[in-house]
Image (spheres, grey):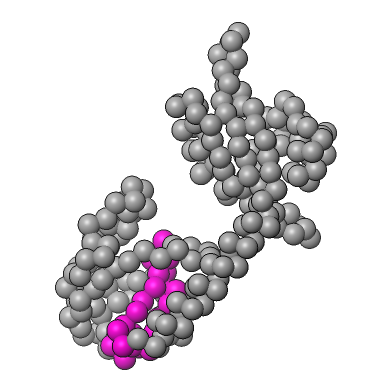
Amino acid sequence: TFTYVSPRALDVLGVSATALMSDNLSFQTMAGDQWPPLRESLRQAARAQTPFEHVLRIDRPQQKTRWLLLAGRPQTHQTNNAERWSGFVQDVTAREELALAQLAMSELQLSTLLNTVGDAIIGSDENSVITHWNPSAEKLLGWSAGQAIGAHLHLIIPDRHRAGHIDGMRHHLLTGETRIIGRPVELPALHADGHEVPVELVINRVQTVDTV
């Protein structure tokens, strides 16, 4: 819960002092689904007693999306050891919009390139949902882009390898560690007609506008 906010900070946050000081408005309610990573940033800073920075996206109905830089440091109250925070908030919308535009252009250029190469290129997000399927993948595995994009990667993973894929993806998302990124691995892939196709798989991580 906020205990003091300067007039300029109120302007940046786009809320009134009354609303901000109420018990039902906090970093958690403002962050929404972005609260877990923000909370983790705060926890790490509190444990290490170090400053923190976090960029928060603010989405409000009928208003332009804004990005705010939250920065501060933990301060332990001398009387009751309560954890308090002091810091500032800065509107970094212009910076974030420029970065997203540059990333979108890079993504468009990458997509154009991937559609022209001879190798089968398949993209997926952190939930293993297929996001890219180039013409060479259509030829190799029999599924059209319209059939494959939006489907789970299990579409092309034989049953006996699916549990291993789930475990490996979960471990990578939790720790950032992987044993196969950038290394060629020979595995079978599932063709649209049901037969298995031996492939040499090389996995790489790519940052895009909406996902990884």
Residue 64 placed where, x, y %?
Answer: 74, 59
Q: In which quarter of the image is residue 181?
A: bottom left
Q: Can residue 62 be seen in this view?
A: yes
Image coords of residue 1 (percent x, y)? 68, 29
Q: Is residue 119 magenta?
A: yes
Residue most toward the top?
79
In the rendered image, the vertical position of residue 11 relative to residue 97, given as above or below: above
Residue at image x 34%, y 51%?
176
Q: Is residue 92 above or below residue 148?
A: above
Q: Looking at this view, name the residue that lies furthest to the bottom.
A: 139
Question: Which residue is at the front of the view, 168 or 107?
Answer: 107
Residue 59 in view here: no
Would residue 210 be found to the left or right of residue 124 on screen?
right
Q: Horizontal placement of 118 versus 124: left or right?
A: left
Does residue 37 appear to the left or right of 179 in the view shown?
right
Q: Nearer the viewer, residue 142 or 205?
A: 205
Looking at the image, which residue is at 18% across and 69% down?
A: 185
Q: Return the residue nearer the eye: 208 or 26.
A: 208
Quadrant assignment, res 198: bottom left
Quarter of the figure that contains the C terminus = bottom left
Q: In which quarter of the image is residue 117?
A: bottom left
Q: Give the range drawn in magenta.
A: 118-140
Residue 93 lies, in percent from the top left, at: 68, 55
- Answer left or right for 27 relative to 167: right
Counting from the top left corner in percent of width and height, residue 177 is at: 29, 51
Indicate whether residue 23 is drawn in magenta: no
Residue 33, relative to residue 134: is it above or below? above
Identify which residue is drawn at 70% across, 30% down: 2
In the figure, 159 relative to 31: above or below? below
